């Protein structure tokens, strides 16, 4: 097994920590790679926001565009140079929340539960884009302010994959899966991962910082993805 | 099922949030209580520290004693009135970390992984008391300062129980168990819970704030504790 752990110790400065755990050649008893088994990447999405074109201009000035700083694992997506301040209802705030691009039809803020507690916002667990009736917040940029009436969520855990991956795991778009993360003294099985199958997606699980910290992802020795109604991946 | 959720939104002010999930009369299809089944309490331990008598006097003044403010679920243990500031190696700090009593033979700081990242301390997962070779930190109180050479840990998840509970679950002191927390859209199975069996203990699982947030414990509809090498509690 080869494991690449990129842990940025500063949650404020870092957006997406990616732990790549190739599923081949596992230690201590190396196995031959299973033919056709896709490489599974588990990524931690730190708090971030998505913006509309209009909100980019309000926050960063007329004519402003998002400036890509770092590509994300999924092709075409990136962490932008820009950050915004998120202000909660009790004037608590998070000073530098990264904007991810490209822009979207609706602005949305994705927080871990720890973040939402510190902001005093009761963010519900939702899948991206499903923001109806969620709490709002205030976004503050260098050139202006946006008052979002809704859009603050805790992103529900999910897994991106293409249709070949879906066939490999025996799942389809909208199904639920289970991720087992084996870490010394703190193994965790995450249930309820929504399958988001798309022609051009890479195989990648997205969990948030709370989930990544609960299983100490950067110390993980093994990750296993299984169909929720199939085997659970536990040791028995 | 009766569920009592006490969620204090301010992590700074609150030490131990306790979610009591009685295992009887579950909704939506109420069942008769299983005879002899013990009530399972799952508690979130927020960051805290334990001090020696000597360190209490250094930090709070000659002759100072811990003053109990709030009893914990385990008889004889309490959150003290006193708090300390924890300072990490890069002069980052947590201003008000609660002291738990009674005093102990060794001072020890227990952090969630999120806390240790914010402090810049690489706290290893350890069971309470097993602090040899762990990182240290500086404790600052109103009357003095203690430089701990070691003792900063991320407390490993564990379950307290008496010997009747151990017999019920078919486990003994030192065994490992598994806790499944069923929450809407974010169910989690925590493996590797160490059994700490003691004559006078109440049945109580201790997880940290990262773990509690990962499974959104205050929204939990069901908790199940099982022997690690037995059934996993997953839906299959």
Image (tube, coloured by chain):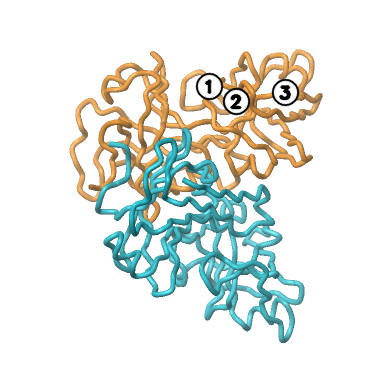
Chain colours: A cyan, B orange
Q: Nearer the viewer, residue A56 or A78?
A: A78
The quarter holding residue B204 reads: top left
Task: Write down the residue under mark 2.
Answer: B100
Secondary-structure class at tag 2: strand
Left or right: residue A189 versus residue A87 is left
Q: Residue furthest bottom?
A: A63
Sequence order check: which comes first, mark 2 or mark 1? 1
- Crowding at dot 3, Cα within 10 Å, few <14 / some 14-19 / many 20+, comes out as few
Q: Decide: marks 1, 3 in contact (CB < 8 A)?
A: no
In whole angstroms, how far apart are the C-alphas of marks 1 and 3? 25 Å
x and y, in percent, of residue B192 in the image: 41, 32
Q: Nearer the viewer, residue A20 or A79?
A: A20
Residue at (52, 37) in percent of width and height? B208
Q: Nearer the viewer, residue B81 or A233?
A: A233
Q: Decide: marks 2, 1 in contact (CB < 8 A)?
A: yes
**Position above or below: A182 against B137:** below
Residue at (58, 41) in percent of width and height? B113
Task: Write down the residue under mark 3.
Answer: B149
- Crowding at dot 2, Cα within 10 Å, few <14 / some 14-19 / many 20+, comes out as many
In whole angstroms, how far apart are the C-alphas of marks 2 and 3? 20 Å
Q: Decide: marks 2, 3 in contact (CB < 8 A)?
A: no
Task: Write down the residue under mark 1.
Answer: B77
Secondary-structure class at tag 3: loop
Q: Tag 2, which chain?
A: B
Left or right: residue A113 versus residue B81 is left
Q: Tag 1, which chain?
A: B
Left or right: residue A116 versus residue A23 is right
- Callout 2 and callout 3 share a chain: yes
């Amino acid at each position: 097994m080869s494991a690449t752990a990129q842990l940025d110790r500063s949650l404020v400065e870092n957006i997406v920590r990616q732990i790549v755990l190739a599923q081949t050649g596992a230690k201590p008893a190396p196995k031959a790679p299973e033919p056709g088994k896709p490489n599974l990447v588990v990524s931690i999405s730190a708090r971030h926001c998505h913006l509309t074109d209009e909100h980019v201009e309000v926050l960063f000035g007329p004519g402003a565009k998002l400036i890509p700083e770092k590509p994300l694992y999924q092709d075409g997506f990136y962490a932008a140079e820009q950050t915004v301040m998120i202000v909660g209802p009790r004037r608590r705030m998070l000073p530098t929340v990264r904007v991810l691009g490209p822009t979207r039809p609706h602005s949305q803020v994705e927080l871990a539960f720890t973040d939402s507690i510190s902001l005093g916002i009761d963010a519900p667990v939702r899948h991206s884009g499903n923001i109806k009736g969620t709490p709002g917040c205030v976004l503050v940029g260098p050139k202006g302010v946006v008052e979002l009436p809704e859009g603050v969520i805790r992103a529900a855990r999910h897994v991106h994959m293409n249709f070949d991956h879906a066939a490999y795991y025996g799942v389809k778009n909208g199904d639920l899966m289970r991720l087992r993360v084996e870490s010394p003294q703190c193994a965790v099985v995450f249930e309820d991962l929504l399958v988001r199958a798309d022609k051009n997606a890479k195989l990648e699980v997205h969990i948030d910082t709370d989930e990544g910290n609960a299983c100490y992802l950067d110390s993980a020795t093994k990750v296993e993805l299984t169909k929720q109604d199939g085997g659970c991946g536990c040791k028995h």
